[in-house]
Image (cartoon, grey):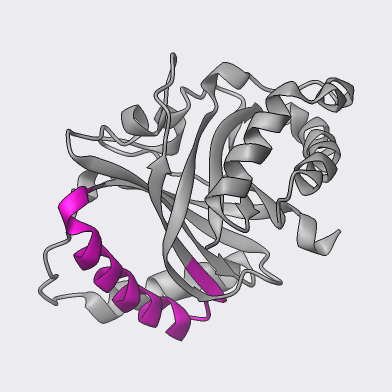
Amino acid sequence: MTYFTGFVAAVPTANKDKYTDHVTAVWPLFESYGANRMVETWGVDVPKGKVTDFFGAVQATDGETIVFSWVEWPDRATADAGMERMQEDPAMQQVPEMPFDGKRVIYGGFAPIFEAGTCDGAGYYQGFLLAVPEQNKAPYVDMALEGWKLFEKGGALGMVENWGEDVPRGKVTDFYRATKAETGEVPVFSWSAWPDRATCDAAAKAMEAEMEGMDMPKMPFDGMRMMWAGFEALFDSAAV
């Protein structure tokens, strides 16, 4: 079963080219460990939130841009073995130095619980982070299906929802602190893929107009602690 390692980081905006060089050099190593694909996206529409947001998730400072990325693996066993090899591989020493503060990167292992469409050809993504009560997993999947119907109608290419399975606690920050997760809640890392930002923005306006005045069903999680942002595709190994 497909498995993802998800990452969120804060990268100095001036280091965008260096970051691209870094991930371009890292991908062949991930591929040698058994990864199927790596996607890196660069924040271009990252709102400030009242309770949580991507800036707070990685303690971003002025002049830093949020990066939202993932590595796709054929299964968790391959992912676990690959991440362990990465820690010990001498070849990692030859990769260009990380042009960002690695201590503030948050990462974890996630299993997809809803997948629709594709991210092939996507130029723009909406990324989401949230915490869902463990007992609400099934209702969340049901909600994702309804959400996909709206996104697809608006021109989305695909959507993936991922349930945290191996999400470590960090010394500085982590997915739990980022989403202010409570006891019994599971971090969720998800995205919708779009051909471009214009299509995504137009769909959002259309959905807002369509839902205006409607009674919204109760969400199976605390929506005030969900964060979202828009990201441009920066690197996709499938396109290399």
Q: Which residues are magenta?
A: 133-159
Residue 207 in percent (x, y) is at 34, 76
Look at 82% across and 31% down and name the residue there: 18
Inspect the magenta stretch and tell me whether residue 141 lies in it.
Answer: yes
Look at 56% across and 17% down and name the residue there: 103
Residue 234 appearing in the image: yes
Q: Is residue 161 left or right of residue 231?
A: left
When asked about the image quadrant of residue 125, the answer is bottom right
Inspect the magenta stretch and tell me whether residue 24 lies in it.
Answer: no
Toward the bottom, the furthest residue is 153
Q: Nearer the viewer, residue 9 or 89?
A: 89
Residue 137 in percent (x, y) is at 24, 59
Residue 43 appearing in the image: no
Q: Majority secondary structure of the magenta segment?
A: helix
Task: Answer above or below: position of 25 versus 104.
Answer: below
Residue 182 in percent (x, y) is at 19, 34
Q: Is residue 172 left or right of residue 52?
A: right
